[in-house]
Image (cartoon, helix red, strand yellow):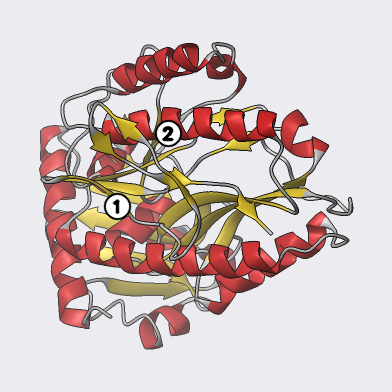
Amino acid sequence: MQTLDERAAEVSAKLAQLRQAMAARAVEALAIYQTANLAWLTAGVPTYINTASETSPVRALITAERAYLLTDSIEAPRLAQEQQVEALGFELVSETWYARSNSLERLAQGKRLGQDGHGSEVNLAAEVQQFRSTLLPSEIVRLRANSRLAAEAMDEAIHAVQPGQTEYDAAARLAAEVHERGGVPVVVLVASDERIFNYRHPLPTNKEIERYAMLVACFRKEGLVISLTRLVHFGAVPPELQRKAEACARVDARLILGTQAGRTMSDMFNLAREAYADEGYPEAIDEHHQGGSAGYAAREVVARPDDQTPLAVNQAFAWNPSIRGIKSEDTILLTEDGVEVLTALDGFPLLPISVDGQRMDRPAILEV
């Protein structure tokens, strides 16, 4: 676990980034509203209450000299006592819940105000997202640790699936395993049997699992979101499904090994399109997105045919190639030495994949 001083140093570095961007845009005060941006700025402080909301009861206001966290008397005690935000370098300002916006207006009065979203004369959302997409060393420490927890949660949940359970049962177990490790399951998808072939985003239902199940999780802890998918089959995997699994694994391996600094999201989209065509499934590129960069959102930037966003070292990615009935997904980190798979499950069966002489094994369907 990181010390308070280490987290305070991270906050200080991020404030310096923001102030440089503010100066470039002639902004004298910057209001941060988005939950993901607040998590990034505070080195992982949970400011949300409603996990489905993109904003929270906390606002940050940054000036050239001060860094405020503005909230109400409901949230202030937890932020001060449990999260120790003042030791991280923030001035905590509390007001009554029905006057929450008054402090921001007062502290920003007379200053040229920017925000991290629409509704402002100066919108710095793009700059903030760019900052939060490239991880500092301390964030990488948290990402690696939390990815191990996400993998453990999935491992427990996928091995607990049994025929006769409902998809709700499997989803509940997966969510419980995430919560037991201090995470928040911001996405839990479960499909079984024909639903895996019919739907790319299968919300769980009361359907009973018969022979085949897919579990998908987005595990959020300390602001960072880790994504992974695993599949289980009861009895031998049918030959046609096995062929699809191997094809999808090869597409995934090509995407992972193709994750290189200097390439663009457009390059990655085209790589996926070519890989699907080579495997005999050219339609798959149009049936679902292929994933993209990750961090304080499940996907920071999704790979699209016209997106020139460059890939960079110290960025996380979650590619999720899928062919009807199969999917492959892990969270990875691009380092100076290449790619590192963060969510591998110890002992989980793998498909041996080689791409241009490079080995990148991918998860197989678990046979029970």
Q: Which mark is residue 260?
A: none
The secondary structure type at the circle numbered 1 is: loop
What quarter of the picture does the C terminus occupy? bottom right
* Residue 5 x/y as whole percent: 15, 80
Asked if residue 135 is positioned above or below residue 200 in the image, the reply reads: below
Q: Which mark is residue 108?
A: 1
In front here: 80 or 350? 350
In front here: 92 or 291? 291
Q: Which mark is residue 252?
A: 2
Q: Quadrant of residue 62?
A: bottom left
Residue 119 visible to an observer of this rendering: no
Q: Quadrant of residue 86?
A: bottom left
Residues tagged 2 and 1 counted as in contact (Cβ below 8 A): no
Which amino acid does the dot numbered 1 rest on?
Ala
In front here: 167 or 203? 167
**In the image, 133: left or right of 102?**
left
Q: Residue at x 14, y 48 (%)?
A: 17
Mark 2 or 1, nearer chain start: 1
Residue 130 visible to an observer of this rendering: yes
* Residue 174 x/y as whole percent: 65, 65
* Residue 22 x/y as whole percent: 17, 41
Q: Residue at x 57, y 37 (%)?
A: 327
In front here: 190 or 41? 190
Q: CA distance from mark 2 to mark 1?
A: 48 Å
* Residue 250 x/y as whole percent: 43, 30
